[in-house]
């Protein structure tokens, strides 16, 4: 890798960017970044300029020779990059609000990465990520693609199946959030905690948990039976697990499992909060307005603590830790989304899984777990099927496949409701789903 290290961040105007900058500053000794290109689209230009100015102030305050470039030209940003990070949102937060509100009308969960919301975010995002992959092949063929864009599992699946980019890693803050949460629960430093993760993005389980290399799973599960300890992610309220269920499961569920194991309760809670304070997207829109007002302050030269309320805490830590480990061939263990390669039996070798990996200069090497425990095997296979069929729908623009994908998802009660939701959401997101509408025009519809 060249001495001049270039990173391109697509979706550079994101409210998360200051956390990424903080990560690069913190790890500069191990990863001497030369230039960071923040790229966004015309609609994100104002945010890009605000965040970019803050990024420059943060780097200046740290006294580091990192050049920050702001651009709307993606090709310029990608040219000769060593790492490309993606954190964009097709249709912005308005699209997310529709993903959340429309399914709720049918008594079905509306959520950014699960069920109908996850499907439609994938349908909008996959064609864009595949365009980026095509440009990377041409402009930075040796670069690593580090994707934070949700739904991260489905996006990684699509890149592995439908592009020539194999140097791709999907990243999520849920595993690191779980580690931090357990460190807090046990009152120990995060560096002493390790969890053996296996499953899929937002469908990952902790198979075991260690402090200083000694298993403490039994103690952690006992503590998690306390309803106040059940959630590690800011934007998902812990509903409290039934102690008997958790002890029989004998694994650490992630916060997103509430949507599957407490489906009706979560739908009711989503309906209630949508009525009272707006959907999560609408809450985030208000939070973002406040954050960007803070970012505008010319005296601000650090990541403001309010950013952690946004729900993406620890992203920078996870992202820059991963990039640093690849760059330095560290061979440490981190949970990421990568190609299965036989690590989990019962999932195709070429599919994306979220699993603890040894991170090397050649990328993540998944730690083989073999067969998953019986209680979780079927659910994980069902969600993997949903991700694969959704990715196929996104690439082919096939309307019937989109209905099939949503019907397969366990959060959807019937094919009839799946069709009704798909029809309404297709109409709502028409501008961002050209692959479906070109096809229907050919059929004369």
Image: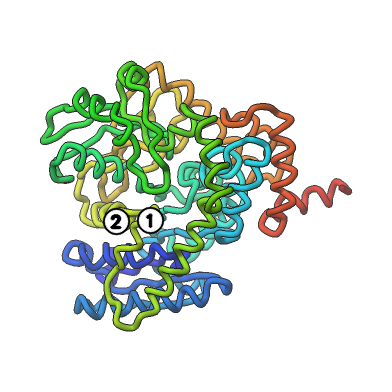
Front residue of 291/147: it is 291
Above or below 119: residue 11:
below
Measured as percent of width and height from the top left, residue 264 is found at 54, 30
Contact between labelled residues 2 and 1, with CB atoms less than 8 Å apart: yes
Above or below 219: residue 300:
below
Of circles 1 and 2, the one toward us is 2
- Name the residue carrying label 1: 144
Front residue of 394/103: it is 103
Whether residue 388 sits left or right of residue 415 in the image: it is left
Measured as percent of width and height from the top left, residue 385 is found at 55, 30
Residue farthest toward the right in the current orientation of the protein: 444
Measured as percent of width and height from the top left, residue 75 is found at 51, 70
| Secondary element at tag 2 | helix
Q: What separation in Å lies between label 1 and label 2 (alpha carbons)?
A: 9 Å
Residue farthest toward the front in the current orientation of the protein: 276
Crowdedness near tag 1: few (<14), some (14–19) or many (≥20) residues, C-alpha within 10 Å: many
- The residue at the point 48 percent across, 58 percent down is 284
Whether residue 91 sits left or right of residue 189 in the image: it is right
Measured as percent of width and height from the top left, residue 176 is found at 29, 45
Q: Quadrant of residue 210?
A: top left
Front residue of 433/308: it is 308
Mark closer to the chain start, 1 or 2:
1
- The residue at the point 48 percent across, 29 percent down is 262
Please indicate, yes or no, whether residue 368 appears anywhere in the rendered image: no
| Secondary element at tag 1 | strand
**Which image quarter is the N terminus in?**
bottom left
Crowdedness near tag 2: few (<14), some (14–19) or many (≥20) residues, C-alpha within 10 Å: many
- Name the residue carrying label 2: 323
- The residue at the point 33 percent across, 54 percent down is 313
Above or below 445: residue 389:
above
Please indicate, yes or no, whether residue 420 appears anywhere in the rendered image: yes
């Amino acid at each position: 890798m060249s001495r001049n290290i270039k990173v391109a961040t697509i979706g550079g105007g994101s409210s998360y960017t200051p956390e990424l900058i903080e990560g690069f500053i913190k790890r500069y000794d191990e990863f001497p970044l030369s230039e960071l290109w923040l790229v966004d689209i015309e609609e994100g230009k104002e945010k890009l300029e605000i965040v970019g100015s803050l990024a420059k102030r943060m780097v200046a305050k740290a006294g580091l020779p990192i050049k920050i470039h702001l651009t709307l030209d993606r090709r310029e940003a990608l040219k000769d990059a060593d790492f490309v990070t993606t954190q964009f949102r097709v249709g912005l937060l308005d699209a997310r609000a529709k993903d959340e509100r429309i399914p709720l009308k049918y008594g079905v969960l509306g959520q950014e990465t699960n069920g109908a919301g996850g499907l439609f975010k994938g349908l909008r995002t996959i064609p864009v990520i595949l365009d980026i992959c095509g440009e990377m092949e041409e402009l930075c063929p040796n670069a690593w693609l580090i994707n934070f864009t949700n739904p991260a599992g489905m996006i990684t699946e699509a890149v592995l199946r439908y592009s020539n980019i194999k140097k791709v890693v999907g990243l999520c803050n849920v595993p690191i959030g779980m580690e931090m949460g357990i460190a807090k629960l046990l009152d120990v430093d995060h560096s002493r905690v390790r969890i053996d993760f296996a499953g899929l993005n937002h469908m990952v389980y902790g198979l075991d948990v260690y402090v200083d290399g000694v298993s403490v799973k039994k103690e952690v599960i006992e503590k998690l039976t306390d309803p106040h300890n059940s959630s590690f992610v800011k934007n998902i309220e812990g509903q409290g697990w039934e102690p008997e269920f958790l002890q029989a499961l004998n694994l650490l569920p992630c916060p997103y499992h509430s949507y599957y194991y407490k489906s009706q309760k979560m739908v009711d809670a989503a309906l209630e909060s949508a009525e009272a304070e707006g959907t999560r997207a609408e809450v985030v829109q208000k939070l973002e307005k406040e954050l960007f007002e803070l970012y505008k302050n010319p005296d601000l030269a650090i990541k403001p603590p309010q950013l952690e309320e946004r729900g993406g805490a620890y992203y920078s830590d996870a992202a820059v830790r991963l990039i640093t480990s690849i760059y330095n061939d560290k061979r440490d263990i981190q949970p990421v989304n990568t190609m299965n390669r036989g690590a989990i039996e019962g999932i195709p070798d070429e599919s994306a899984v979220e699993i603890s990996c040894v991170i090397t200069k050649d990328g993540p090497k998944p730690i083989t777990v073999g067969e998953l425990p019986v209680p979780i095997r079927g659910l994980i296979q069902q969600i993997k099927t949903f991700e694969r069929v959704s990715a196929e729908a996104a690439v082919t623009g096939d309307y019937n496949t989109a209905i099939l994908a949503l019907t397969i998802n366990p959060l959807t009660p019937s094919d009839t409701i799946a069709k009704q939701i798909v029809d309404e959401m297709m109409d709502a997101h028409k501008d961002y789903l050209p692959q479906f509408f070109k096809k229907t025009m050919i059929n004369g519809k």
